[in-house]
Image (cartoon, rainbow, N blue to C red):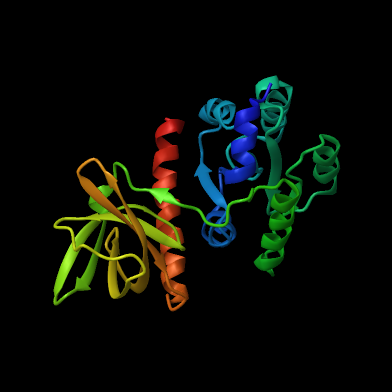
Amino acid sequence: MENSNSKKDTEISGKKIFFLYPSAVIQNEIAFDLTQQEYEVYFTREHINLRSVLKQFPDSVVFINLDDGLSGKDWDNWIRSIQADPTMASVALGVITAVKNDDSSQKYSAMGLKGGYTVINKMDISKTIIGLMEILKANDAHGRRKFLRATTTGHEELTSINIPHNGQYYKGVINDISVAGLSCVFVPDPDLEKNSLCKDIQIKLHSTILKGEGIVFGSRMEGMMKVYVFIFTQRIDPEVRTKIRSFIQSIMQAKMDNLLK
């Protein structure tokens, strides 16, 4: 049975979306676009290990690429095994294929898949994306959250922030980030006041340097360190937001990969 607290958390934070054995088109175009719509997307080719992860996150949505990984009969058995396990009763399974087949469509429709049966529209991928978004909306995959936020714990060396203040630059480490803003720690402390506007902020994510501006939303003490919270202004370039979302997905994917091992 599903834990009521887990269900409440999912209603707030949204659901994890797995693409199992994704093709290049699924991963690079379809799933990328869903990531840019603030869905929490993961990729895996570990159908066996995914079972244990789904028991930890039973509200997940799983889209299976029928064209890879297992044979049709083996996929049927895998799907039925998930459906038959009471600990995964709330997992929403769906299938994706690049090959239209009426018999296959009828078979999977009869299995009552909450994630539907999707045939990739090779001539217009946007139609496939819209269809998948409708499925995700029906399964309340977004929850009540607006933005995905990634903590950089264990990946601190991949991120940094530099700001100009009072004639000098201060370098900091990012604690977490979303397209709405970030929290960070500076050494030394620049002693920023609340509501201060910081222009020409430089953010390093992996090897990518992004520029923007933000307002100091506030600060808090964590031990001996002062943690600043910045809210990005609307003057942030849309391409910067795209790269932030891609970075967030990569950090979350790396953490999920550890669970899938």
Q: In this rendering, does residue 85 appear at all?
A: no
Front residue of 219/23: it is 219
Q: Quadrant of residue 26?
A: bottom right
Q: Quadrant of residue 209?
A: bottom left
Front residue of 179/116: it is 179
| Residue drawn 55% across the image and 28% down it | 56
The answer to whether 192 appears left or right of 27 in the picture is left
The residue most toward the front is: 193
Q: Position of residue 86 (x, y in %)?
A: 70, 20
Front residue of 169/97: it is 169
| Residue drawn 40% across the image and 40% down it | 255
| Residue drawn 76% across the image and 49% down it | 138
Front residue of 27/207: it is 207
The answer to whether 5 appears left or right of 205 in the picture is right
| Residue drawn 56% across the image and 48% down it | 22
Quarter holding the C terminus? top left
Quarter holding the N terminus? top right
Q: Quadrant of residue 9?
A: top right
Q: Position of residue 11 (x, y in %)?
A: 65, 42
Q: In this rendering, does residue 173 appear at all?
A: yes
Q: How many marks?
A: 0
Q: Position of residue 251 (x, y in %)?
A: 39, 48
The answer to whether 234 appears left or right of 84 in the picture is left
The answer to whether 240 appears left or right of 98 in the picture is left
Q: Position of residue 61 (x, y in %)?
A: 64, 41
